[in-house]
């Protein structure tokens, strides 16, 4: 920025470049230090949200397959930035981090689409299909729907864990040829290297998480078999002891892959991250219990000038539970509230007097304000 340029005169790219040099640090909440502690605490701590009733919208993502989106609109939906948020494995549009981002983004004047992946959010009965980490085309279909139906002029993607992989994969597949409305993408602890992360999940220290995922995935498979008799062979569940086993015997088998290695390779965003052509923020904790980013993928990320990669010492998996400010119980319910927060930021730097302590959610919205 030259001496005559004010922050308002800067382009989004200039603002993003400045953030690379000065990311807001993450400080874990007192007594909540360590990857496992952060991860489990974020799951167990119950939060309160105040959100307006969303528009429920079913969107066709391929013939015979629909997904459920919960849409929150500003009064001028066409000109507000629209953020599509994608949840992680066995999450839904009602996952706490989805609601937390939504509350903050609405207050910042953005539209929010809380996207349920296939079968998630109570939609098992919609189609005899399963979901997987490579379904970036489903998110693309949702993006094209809101562009065509609602006339949105600016679009961004955000995702957590599995959802983070999906939005990065879509951004890489689009490259410089995506919709003209596409502005930015954010991923939190993305499962960008599926094979290494799956193997890490099977380590003894992470068996609690793997057992939970396997319990939830088995339950869903049994539910699908009840809803669609003859479509799913539940005997394939026998002998499954790891997520890799499940993805080999179930996910790959029913989703058109030749096996688990083929699935992990083709579905990992690591294959296309170097092609991302819009400003991108990736947030990752060095002590994430089971998400791993390989040296090769790190080199691809580092070589792409469009990507800001922020790695914190603490934060766990998609947790980043920091200390709330004294006024954090005031909900993020209005754009006027967001303007007040902006004034606080202008006075106190990055400090937000209404910070509820959920660092990644705050950083998503702060990053997307540039667009």
Image (cartoon, rainbow, N blue to C red):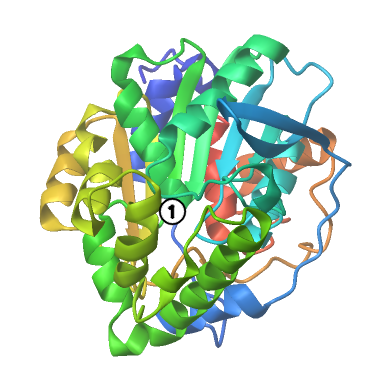
Count all numbered tags in the image, as a single digit. 1
Is residue 110 among what the camera can see? no
**Relative to 92, is 64 above or below?**
above
Residue at image x 49%, y 46%? 159
Q: Quadrant of the N terminus?
A: top left
Where 82 sits versus 259, above or below? above
What residue is pinned by disc 1?
162
Return the x and y of residue 277 as percentages of the image width and height. Answer: 30, 23
Mark 1 surroundings: few (<14), some (14-19) or many (≥20) residues within 10 A: many
Residue 276 visible? The answer is yes
Residue 254 or 41: which is nearer the viewer? Answer: 254
Where residue 369 sits: x, y (%)?
Answer: 58, 31
Say whether residue 300 is left or right of residue 83: left
Query: Quick one: 362 or 5, which is closer to the camera?
Result: 362
Q: Quadrant of residue 49?
A: bottom right
Q: Is residue 67 left or right of residue 267?
A: right
Residue closest to the far front: 230
**Which secondary structure lies at badge 1?**
helix
Foreground pick, 202 / 28: 202
Q: What residue appears at the point 30 percent right and 79 percent down from the top-left corner?
A: 202
* Percent x, y of residue 140: 49, 26
**Up/down of 325 relative to 13, above or below:** below
Which residue is at a point 65% across and 19% down the rendered structure image?
146
Task: Please indicate whether residue 127 sits to the left or right of residue 107 in the image.
Answer: left
Which residue is outermost to the right? Answer: 53
Percent across and percent down for residue 153 are 61, 12
Question: Image point 51% across, 23% down: which residue?
Answer: 7
Viewer-nearest residue: 339 or 62: 62
């Amino acid at each position: 920025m030259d001496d005559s340029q004010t922050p308002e005169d800067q382009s989004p790219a200039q603002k993003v470049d400045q953030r690379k040099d000065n990311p807001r640090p993450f400080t874990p909440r007192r007594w909540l230090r360590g990857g496992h502690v952060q991860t489990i605490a974020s799951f167990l701590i119950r939060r309160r949200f105040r959100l307006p009733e969303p528009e429920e919208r079913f969107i066709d993502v391929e013939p015979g397959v629909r997904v459920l989106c919960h849409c929150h609109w500003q009064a001028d939906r066409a000109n507000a930035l629209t953020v599509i948020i994608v949840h992680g494995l066995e999450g839904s549009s009602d996952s706490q981090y989805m609601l937390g981002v939504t509350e903050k983004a609405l207050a910042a004047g953005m539209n929010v689409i809380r996207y349920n992946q296939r079968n998630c959010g109570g939609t098992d009965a919609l189609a005899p299909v399963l979901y997987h980490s490579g379904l970036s085309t489903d998110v693309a279909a949702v993006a094209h729907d809101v562009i065509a139906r609602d006339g949105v002029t600016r679009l961004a993607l955000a995702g957590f864990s599995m959802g983070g992989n999906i939005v990065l994969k879509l951004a890489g597949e689009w490259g410089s040829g995506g919709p003209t409305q596409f502005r930015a993408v954010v991923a939190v602890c993305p499962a960008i290297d599926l094979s290494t992360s799956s193997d890490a999940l099977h380590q003894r220290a992470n068996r609690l998480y793997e057992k939970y995922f396997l319990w939830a995935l088995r339950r869903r498979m049994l539910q699908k078999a009840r809803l669609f008799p003859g479509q799913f062979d539940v005997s394939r569940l026998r002998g499954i002891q790891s997520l890799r086993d499940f993805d080999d015997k179930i996910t790959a088998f029913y989703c058109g892959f030749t096996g688990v290695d083929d699935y992990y390779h083709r579905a990992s965003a690591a294959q296309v991250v170097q092609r991302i052509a819009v400003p991108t923020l990736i947030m990752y904790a060095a002590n994430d219990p089971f998400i791993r980013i390989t040296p090769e993928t790190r080199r691809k990320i580092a070589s792409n000038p469009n990507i800001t990669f922020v790695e914190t010492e603490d934060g766990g998996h998609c947790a980043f539970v920091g200390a709330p400010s004294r006024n954090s119980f005031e909900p993020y319910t209005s754009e006027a509230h967001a303007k007040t927060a902006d004034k606080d930021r202008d006075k106190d730097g990055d400090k937000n007097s209404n910070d509820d302590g959920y660092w990644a959610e705050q950083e998503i919205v702060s990053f997307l304000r540039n667009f």
